[in-house]
Image (tube, helix red, strand yellow):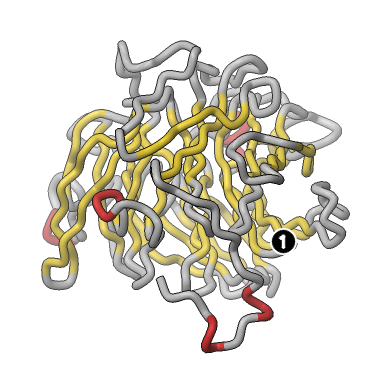
Amino acid sequence: MGPDIFLGGLFFPQPLAFENPPELTITQFAGPDLVPSPACLAVAPTGEVYVGVDMIGSLGKTPGKGRIVKLVDSDNDGKLDKHTNFVDVDNPRGIIVSGTKVFVLHTTFSKETKLATGMDLVVFEDKNGDGIADGPEQPLIQNFSNTKYLQERGTDHATNGIRMGIDGWIYVSVGDFGFYNAVDRSGKKMTMLGGGIVRVRPDGTEMEVFIHGTRNVYDVAIDPFMNVFTRENTNDGGGWNIRFSHYVQSGEYGYPLLFQHFTDEILPALVDVGGGSGTGNLFMDEPNWPAKFNKVPMMADWGRSMLYIHRVTPDGPTFTQKDEEFIKLAQITDLDVDGSGRLYLSAWDGAGYNGSPSKGYVVRAVPTDWKYQAFPNVEKLSEKNWPIC
């Protein structure tokens, strides 16, 4: 979402400025009265939507302006019925919902000086189901960004989106601020100079580097076979361009030292698509979605106000791709889907680099012939009754 590029003419004022593919029905779900400046969101399999409100923005530095809002459509008619302020956190940059647990990546601030002190990956829990976190956060990884740059610039190129793979690891997108002496729950310390992907167990142990050599990756899309894709912003010789990449564990992707003159020492991107600003990503794999929009990485681009589909075709150890415009949404920041196929997307919508209390919204998209099917209680299913995707 950073200010790396500004593509004039692509920002859309309210009323809602999305384009509706004829195969989908897209409706407003929540407006700026509830979810101003939405930087990220996550959806529980059962349909509850958690939105990271960030009125500090990418360049702001004043704490006390962030929260996670829980949105609920109780009767599944597509309209918001109730909401709660789940927890107050500053600069939420990633959310994962898993049962009663909500994992959040956010910036931390000193209560005394009001200055940023770092970023933490934490977990909250709501065991009584009242929509409010039961108690204080439990840290998984601390010191997960560069304090100096957070204080000087803001959370712009810091540590970003989080997503859980089918392998049970949490994958964390690290911007080129990197981090120094991040510590996980086992006491393991690690430093990353520059950007990449880090992964960690949900209990906060076994923190490790997954790939290195990116600039400002904001989020990852992970398919059921653990192929990791991203639409990542760079600046190492060819302008502030977006590259769509397939990440292979232990891979080196070149930023900032190798890309121009040592290309034989890096794993290349699948395509350079030109200017933009990549934000939230999702691998769509839902059986009740049309085949033409299914089993594909969906990649948000804040600078272009567009959700893209990248159609990937296996090619030896990696893929070839073909990208296409999908849904236009004003400064789109993130997207996620629930267990019945409801896709939710968040729009920054001109909230600026310091956030705004009056800009931003969330929309809901479903296939035009979609019908609600309750997500089963998987803990009570026998092996014979597990859904087949």
Residue beneath label 1, please?
101
Q: Amino acid at mark 1?
A: Lys
Residue at the spot x=59%, y=35% of the render?
150
Left/right placement of residue 106 relative to residue 229 reads right
The answer to whether residue 56 is visible is: no
Question: Which one is in front, 340 or 318?
Answer: 340
In the rendered view of the protein, which quadrant contains the C terminus? bottom left
Q: Is residue 37 above or below residue 217?
A: above
Residue at the spot x=84%, y=35% of the render?
111
Residue at the spot x=72%, y=61% of the render?
101
Residue 313 % position (x, y): 16, 61
The answer to whether residue 182 is visible is: yes
| Residue 180 occupies quadrant | bottom right
Left/right placement of residue 95 relative to residue 256 reads right
Q: Secondary structure at mark 1?
A: strand
Residue 303 % position (x, y): 35, 26
Q: Is residue 319 above or below residue 218?
A: below
Residue 241 % position (x, y): 24, 34
Q: Residue furthest bottom?
A: 383
Residue 366 % position (x, y): 44, 43
Left/right placement of residue 275 relative to residue 284 reads left
Question: Which one is in front, 8 or 237?
Answer: 8
